[in-house]
Amino acid sequence: MKGRDAPSLMGEWGMAEEILRKLLFHKRSLRKDETIDIFRRVTYFFPKDFVLTNYPRQPVAVFNPGAVLVGKSLHVFPRVIFDYYKYVSSIGHFVVDIDDLFNGKVKKPIEMEIVFWPRDIQEFLGCEDPRVFFRDSRFEILYTAKGYKDWSQEGKPHTDFLAYAVLDEDLNLLEKKYVSIKSTLGDFIPVSMKDSSFVESNVILTRITVGDTKVCWRGRMEGDSIDLYSLDPVFFPEKWETKVGWSTNAVRVKRGYLIGWHAVLKDLTYKNGLALVDGRGKLLGTTNYVLSPKGVIEEYGDRIRVIFGCGLVVYEGKVIWIGGVSDWAIGVFEADEGEIMNLMKEAT
C-alpha cells in the first residue's frame, strides 16, 4: 500500500475530517482582519537579473524562493519558469552576501544554477516552492512535487506531493523521497500535502487538504512518513479567508520558532503573518497580517496581488522575508524582530 491511496483508511480519515471541522468552528476567533504592514522593502530581483550557468534558456519568472543563511552567504532557491505552454517549474540556486544585499552592492546579472527539475512522474508538472534548511553541512529541502501517482492519472486532477531532498554543499543530490502519511493500516498520499517546514528533530509543520478545507497541521516524521496519529491541526482559516498555509521555513528565536504563514482572502488577495511555535510545533502565538502586496511590482504579475513564501532568516535583530511577488519576481523584506514580537497575540 506504500505510496498509494488506501480505501480502508477513508473511514478513519473521514473521522479526522469531522474532528477538524469542529476544531475549525471553535478556533476562528484567533486573528483579526487587520493589516499592519511592518516590513520594509529592501530590494527586488527580476527574471532579467539572472544568467543561467547550466541551462541555455532565459527565465520568464523567478519567484517563491526558499532561503537559508550560512555565515554571511544567503543561499536562495527560487522557483523558476521558462515558458507558459505547460508552466512547468524547476528550482534554482544563487548566492548573495547578506551585507551586500542591505548595502545595495549586489552585482547583476547574478549567476544561477538549476538544481531541481522534473525527473519523476510525481513531479511531472513541476518542482515548486522550496523551504530550505542547512544542517550538518547539508541543504535539506522540502518542496512541492506537482504530478501523478501513476501514468493513468495524466489528464485528471494532479496530486501535490511533499518532496524531501538532501544536497551536499556543492549542490550534489544525496537523497530524495516523497513523504506519505502512515497509519496502522498502511501508508497513503493525500490529494495535496505541501507548504511544509521542519521544526526540531522529527517535528514537521505541513498543510494537508482534507475535503475542501486547507488547514495547517503539526506532526511527527518517522522515516519518510508522517505518523497519522501524531497529526494535530493548529492553524485555521478565518471566516473571511478561503485557505491558509505555512509560507516559510521555521527559524529559531528566543521564545521558540518563528514561521511565516499566508492566507488567501475572499477577494483572492494573499496576505501574510508570522506565527510562533514551540519545538513540538504547538502554536504559541500569531500576528495578524504584517506583510501584504502593494504597488505595481508586487500587485501585478502572473497571479495578481500575491506575496508568497518561502524564505525566512534572522540576522542582527532583523527578520528577513525573501518571498515571491505576484508569481514573477523576488522581493526582500525586513522588519525588527522586537516589533514583530510586540504584535504577537498569544494562542489560547
Image (spheres, grey):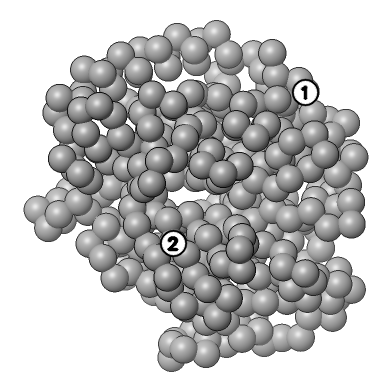
- Residue shown at 44%/27% (left/top)? 231
Nearer mark to the viewer, of 1 and 2: 2
Question: Where is residue 44 drawn, in percent x and y?
Answer: 72, 68
Q: Is residue 316 left or right of residue 344?
A: right
Question: Where is residue 106 drawn, in percent x and y?
Answer: 78, 80
- According to the image, label 1 marks what residue? 345
| Residue 68 appears in the picture as rendered | yes
Alpha carbons under labels 1 and 2: distance apart:
34 Å
Residue type marked 2: Ala
| Residue 60 appears in the picture as rendered | no
Q: In which quadrant of the rendered image does the C terminus lie?
A: top right
Residue 28 image-quadrant placement? top right
Question: Where is residue 200 drawn, in percent x and y?
Answer: 61, 42
- According to the image, label 2 marks what residue? 165
- Residue shown at 20%/51% (left/top)? 149
Identify which residue, 229 or 334, lies in the foreground.
229
Residue type marked 1: Lys
Question: Where is residue 347 drawn, in percent x and y?
Answer: 70, 19
First in sequence: mark 1 vs mark 2: 2
- Residue shown at 71%/41% (left/top)? 258
